Each structure stands twice: as C-alpha cells, then as structure tokens.
Image: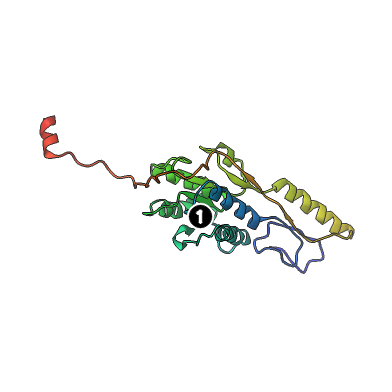
Amino acid sequence: VVDVQSTVPVVAIDPHEGPTGLPTVDSDNLAGAVRATEHLLELGHRRIGLVAGRPDLESSRLREEGYRQALAAAGIAVDPALVRVGDYRKPTSRGPATELLTMPDRPTAVFAANDLSAISTIEVARELGLSVPEDLSVIGFDDIPESRTTTPPLSTVRQPIQQMGATAIELLIALLDGTPVDSTHVRLPTTLVRRASTAPVPSPVVPATVPATAPAPSAAEVAALS
C-alpha cells in the first residue's frame, strides 16, 4: 500500500489501476494485445479465444480491449463464448481453457492474457489430444523465462521489464533532485515474439475429445479370451 500523501517521491511500476496521481511506468498492454491478436489473424485464424486476466487489473482490461479492437478492425464480431476469465494463474486458467477447447465449434487459436495462462492452455490442449500448433495455436503475454522452455516454445508479447525498472529509477532520481521531467506517466512499447506455438489455421479443424475410460469388452470378446 502506498501513502499517496507522503512527501517522499514514489514511482509505481505496472500499477494495478493504471496511471493515477502517482508517477508510473508501464508497458503498452493495449498495443501488445492488438499485435498478438493480429498475429493470429495473419495466420488465418478467425475463431480466436481469449483467456483473460483478473478483471480488477488495468493490464487485464487493456489486453482484453486490444483483443477486441483487433477483431473489430478485421471485421470479426466478438463471440462472448470465446472470452473466458483465467485470473492470470495456471490453476485458475485450466477451467476456462478446458471450456474453450471442448466447445463444439472450438477456437483454432487462443490468446492468453499472460504466459502462465498460455502454458496452462497448452497443457490442457495436450490432455485433450490436441497438438500445438498443429491443431491449436496459442500465444501469451509477458515473455517470462518459462515461455522459452515450454513445449513447444511459446509465442508471446515481450514486456521490457528491465527497461521499465531502469526508467522508474531514472524518474525517481529526477523527482528526488527536483529535475523537470517530460512526463510522470511513462508507457514503453512491447514486442511480438514469434515462437513455435503459433502456426497457420489447420484445415479441417480437429475437435477435442474429453478423455474417457476404455469400453468394456463385449460378450463375444470375453468368450474369445476364455
């Protein structure tokens, strides 16, 4: 919790509620989400699911808005059934991912609002018998270290974390010194990172199947084994 009445300068990095009265440094969540969705559209995907983040976070709201803007620009209406809340965590993303991938007309691609949700989506797809990216493309957001080592390596949107930290320190030093600054709200660009989890839309789309137990042998089969 930050005391906004304090006389000590404070700089917030990636604030939960967006730019406020405090100086802030964040990344361009909106543009990054637009670019992630555009990447899937460029690969031919039209049914694109979204595993969104926490609705109370500014970054989540902006990433969902970017997804919606990119679809609208492509002339595609957002299907509410393709938008599910995943809470930015792997355990809570499994349910929404399963719901998306077991739909009768499932998406051919999923934009997960962060990498943990994307990795969870890949795990669920594998459990349902879907191959990534042959049957399903998945893209995340953040470019955490795990995104490089997951199977397949995850396409994502890179946040300039080191630059955000350095910019925040520079801004804080300027405020402490009383040096005039151009802006107390700094937004840094994001970068699309293409890896192996995204590919052109498959044709035809392979439906997911919920794993089931093996059927019991018939009477004839039992007799043959006797």
In the image shown, does 95 or 45 lie closer to the viewer? 45
Q: Which residue extends farthest front?
A: 75
- Drawn side of residue 106 relative to residue 162, left or right: left
Q: Quadrant of residue 22?
A: bottom right
Q: Which residue extends farthest bottom?
A: 5
Residue 50: x, y in percent?
51, 55
In the image shown, does 98 or 190 lie closer to the viewer? 190
Residue 110: x, y in percent?
50, 50
Q: Residue at (14%, 35%) from the top-left corner?
A: 221
In the image shown, does 98 or 76 lie closer to the viewer? 76
Colour treatment of the image? rainbow
- Drawn side of residue 200 relative to residue 7, left or right: left
- Drawn side of residue 77 relative to residue 169, left or right: left
Residue 119: x, y in percent?
51, 45
Q: Residue at (70%, 51%) from the top-left corner?
A: 189
Which secondary structure lies at badge 1?
strand
Q: Residue at (57%, 41%) from the top-left corner?
A: 147
> How many marks are shown on the rendered structure?
1
**Looking at the image, is 72 positioned above or below residue 156?**
below
In the rendered view of the protein, which quadrant contains the C terminus? top left
- Drawn side of residue 107 relative to residue 213, left or right: right
Give amino acid for label 1.
Val
In the rendered view of the protein, which quadrant contains the N terminus? bottom right
Residue 219: x, y in percent?
11, 39
In the image shown, does 12 or 108 lie closer to the viewer? 108
Decide: few, some or many residues near mark 1? Use Cα within 10 Å; few <14, some 14-19, many ≥20.
many
**Looking at the image, is 95 positioned above or below residue 198?**
below
Q: Which residue is mark 1?
A: 51
